Amino acid sequence: MEGKTGPFKIILGSSSIARRNILSEMGYEFTLMSADIDEKSIRKEKPEELVMALAEAKADSIVLKLQSISNHEKDEMPTILIAADTVVVYEGVVREKPANEKEAREFIRGYSGGHCATVGSVIVTNIKTGVRKGEWDRVEIYFHKIPDEIIDKLIEEGAVLHVAGALIIEHPLIRPYVKQVVGTTDSVMGLPKSLTEKLIKEVL
């Protein structure tokens, strides 16, 4: 990728398809690496602290992996690692992936006619210099009443079972019931574009 600062390589430290799509939309070419961390072992009081700690742990894990793959040809080109994490917050409580269909249904029923927020972090590390910058972003989402048959269809279809808070606002079944998004959809999906751009510039 030719940036204003000259060429650099990007590693996206995530297996999330949504994050992959967003980074591609931003015009970057990148390679993928996923972190091996036990997310459940990381616990913080505040959602903002939690997502920062999780993204930090993912970044550390990947940096270690990269160090163990000894690069014989010393790379002149800087490598930028992007790590991110997102949680859903409902009535002050952090929601991760639903444990089962019953919990997913409860989660979505709660959003019906109500609201929730996503808190997402981005941590960008310049592997060459070790410079790391990170920030979090919060988006508020308001919903119309979601009919039970729509919730049933969502559960049956299954995608909501694999995401934090069983929340996919860009899903065709849910989209008509999203009343207002205060913030950006890309942030809800896991990677706020403008924040990511800003952090990439800051670490180069």
Image (cartoon, helix red, strand yellow):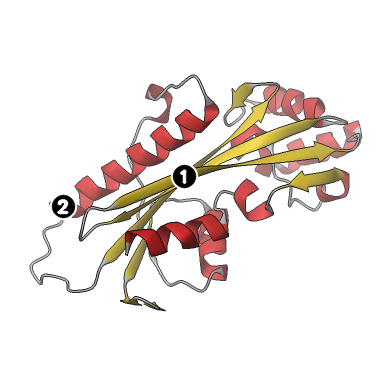
Using the image, tell me which numbered label, if any, was put on residue 67: 2
Q: Is residue 107 above or below residue 184?
A: above
Q: Amino acid at mark 2?
A: Gln
In the image, 99: left or right of 20? Answer: right
In the image, 116: left or right of 113? Answer: left
Instruction: Measuring from the top left, give residue 183's x and y in whole percent.
Output: 69, 48
Mark 1 or mark 2, which has the lower sequence index? 2
Instruction: Measuring from the top left, give residue 191's x and y in whole percent.
Output: 54, 53
Residue under label 1? 135
User: Distance from label 1 to label 2 (Cα)?
Assistant: 25 Å
- Residue 40 appears anywhere in the view: yes
Q: Quadrant of the N terminus?
A: bottom left
Instruction: Measuring from the top left, give residue 30's x and y in whole percent.
Output: 40, 67
| Local SS, label 1 | strand
Q: Nearer the viewer, mark 1 or mark 2?
A: 1
| Local SS, label 2 | helix
Label 2 crowding class (10 Å Cα cut-off): few <14, some 14-19, many 20+? few
- Residue 99 appears anywhere in the view: no
Q: Amino acid at mark 1?
A: Glu
Taking the spot 49% from the left edge, 19% from the top edge, the residue there is 45
Using the image, tell me which numbered label, if any, was put on residue 145: none
